[in-house]
Amino acid sequence: MTAKGTFDTADWTPQPPYEEGDGVSLAHVTLGKTFHGDLTGTSTVSMIMALTPVADSRAYVAMERVVGTLAGRSGSFVLQHFAVGDRGEQSLRVSVVPDSGTGGLSGLMGEMDILIAPDGSHSYVFDYRL
């Protein structure tokens, strides 16, 4: 099944880099999201970023706990993010952590694509199965 919608981000809270050397910084960021559309709910994201001297070369990994409703079922689940920007070429994989679903979302599996429009708005396409 496929769920589609938008999400808003809030409370982007970068911490000072916890390690720096030769122009490369490692830093922790937290933020919140509110999902609209086929998935409704909120999430908390904990992200670790690697920033390089090349503006379009960076990466992040993150864990995101989502609490909400999907296909009429309420519960929570965890998403794992793996993203790389290689001199402007972007790759992103966002997957449901196996067996992280709770309540009505127990057994949830899937992959989420995150899309950013030119105006900066965010949307998602979530291919999943319950």
Image (tube, helix red, strand yellow):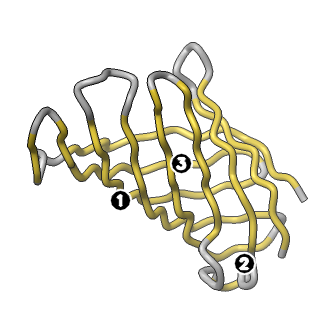
Identify the residue at the far top of this view. Answer: 118
Q: Quadrant of residue 108?
A: bottom right
Decide: marks 2, 3 in contact (CB < 8 A)? no
Please tell me which residue is depicted at 36% across the width and 49% down the height of the picture.
31
Dot placed on the residue nearer the N-terminal end, 2 or 1: 1
Residue that badge 2 annotates: 105
Question: Residue 129 location in percent, x, y?
Answer: 85, 70
Q: Earlier in the sequence, mark 2 or mark 3?
A: 3
User: In the image, what residue occupies the spot 55% across and 27% down?
Assistant: 89
Q: Residues within 10 Å of mark 1 (few under 14, many from 20)?
A: some
First of labels 3, 1 by sequence position: 3
**Disc 3 to disc 1, C-alpha distance:** 15 Å
Residue visible at 9% across and 42% down in the picture: 21
Q: Of the numbered discs in the image, which one, if any, rests on residue 34? A: 3
Q: Is residue 110 left or right of residue 92?
A: right
Please provide percent x and percent y for residue 29.
28, 49
Q: Which residue is mark 1?
A: 46
Q: Is residue 28 left or right of residue 16?
A: right
Q: Residue at x 83, y 64 (%)?
A: 71
Q: Nearer the viewer, mark 2 or mark 3?
A: 2
Amino acid residing under circle 3: Thr
- CA–CA distance between discs 2 and 3? 18 Å
* Quadrant (top left, top right, bottom left, bottom right) of the N terminus: bottom right
* Disc 3 packing (10 Å; few <14; some 14–19; many ≥20): some
Residue type at the position of mark 1: Ser
